[in-house]
Amino acid sequence: MQKNAPAIRKARVVVLKTGTTYPDLRAEFGDFDEWFLRGLSEELEITVANAEAGELPGNPEDWDGIVVTGSPAMVSDRAEWSENAGRWLAKAVKSEVPVLGVCYGHQLLAHALGGEAGYHPNGRETGTHEIELLPEAASDVLFRDLPKTFPAQLTHRQSVLRLPEGAVLLGRNRFEPHQAFRIGPCAWGVQFHPEFTDAIMSAYLKVQAPDLIREGLDAEALIAGVKPAPDASSLLARFSRFVQDRIH
């Protein structure tokens, strides 16, 4: 009689929620954490921790992977909850726990590891824009199978102004020189939003339109330029596979 094969353990991943979206978007699409849950693999065991409310989920080593969301907050304000989350992430990187930081998470990761985050000198980047991968991405486990250039959804006013020492730059574009980086063997930051659909991006631009016009940006052209960004979105599935494969 053949014995039953042991059940494969699901990787335990925590999503650090660092803020909440506009009320109208939340009513239609759900909040930041829900967008990530839709993109990450269902094979993961996912927990959401509200970092903005001061929740830090135990020791980083308790987790097989960590995802950090975007936020309307600003890393350079150095709010207590943000600084605490940054120190927690620095421990995760030191312990080689896989991390994927997105937008605010990307900036917080860089800041926590000795880089600098702050307002981009040329203002806001928002809408669907091209990302260019650098040669270093060809050997990176998350980026190596992506095309050299691909569209991605973006909305940010702050950026990583200086990468941490030892970070490997993976992606950029004309506006933003630090679109993606890796530090250590398995911690990544991306300025763009793999969790955004084109519908979410369009909704953001419609809410932002009055501000965009005041800032001298062409809101109508940005809305018309929104398109799907499947290669950028695939990073969530790629990170899921990396985390799940790593525990077996």
Image (cartoon, rainbow, N blue to C red):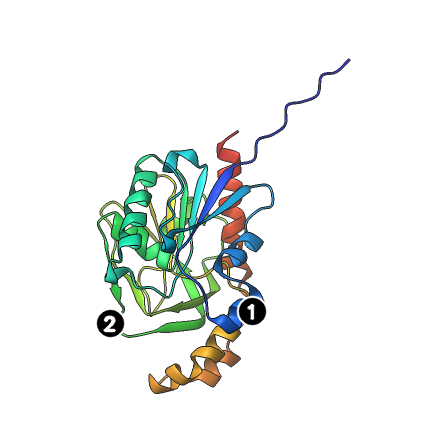
214 to 106, vertically: above or below: below
| Residue at 21% across, 49% down | 114
- Nearest to N terminus: mark 2 or mark 1: 1
Residue closest to the eye, 49 or 91: 49
Q: Position of residue 13 (x, y in %)?
A: 48, 42
Please identify, in this view, whether the residue under mark 2 or under mark 1 is nearer the observer.
Answer: 1
Instruction: Quadrant for residue 133, please give it.
Output: bottom left
Q: Position of residue 144 (x, y in %)?
A: 46, 48
Q: Are marks 2 and 1 in contact (CB under 8 Å)?
A: no
| Residue at 49% across, 71% down | 23
Q: Secondary structure at mark 1?
A: helix
Q: Is residue 134 visible?
A: no
Query: Residue flagged by tag 1: what amino acid is it?
Result: Ala
Query: Residue flagged by tag 2: what amino acid is it?
Result: Pro
106 to 221, vertically: above or below: above
**Left-right relation of 108 to 147:** left
115 to 91, vertically: above or below: below
Task: List the residue tagged with mark 1.
Answer: 27
Q: Secondary structure at mark 2?
A: loop
Residue closest to the eye, 48 or 194: 48
| Residue at 24% across, 62% down | 77
Instruction: Quadrant for residue 97, please give it.
Output: top left
Neighbour tally class for label 1: few under 14, some 14-19, many 20 plus, Cα within 10 Å = few
Q: Is residue 22 visible?
A: yes
Neighbour tally class for label 2: few under 14, some 14-19, many 20 plus, Cα within 10 Å = few
Task: List the residue tagged with mark 2.
Answer: 121
| Residue at 47% across, 77% down | 205
Badge number at residue 133: none
Q: Position of residue 165 (x, y in %)?
A: 22, 47
Kindly report the distance in space between the C-alpha atoms of the residues bearing marks 2 and 1: 33 Å
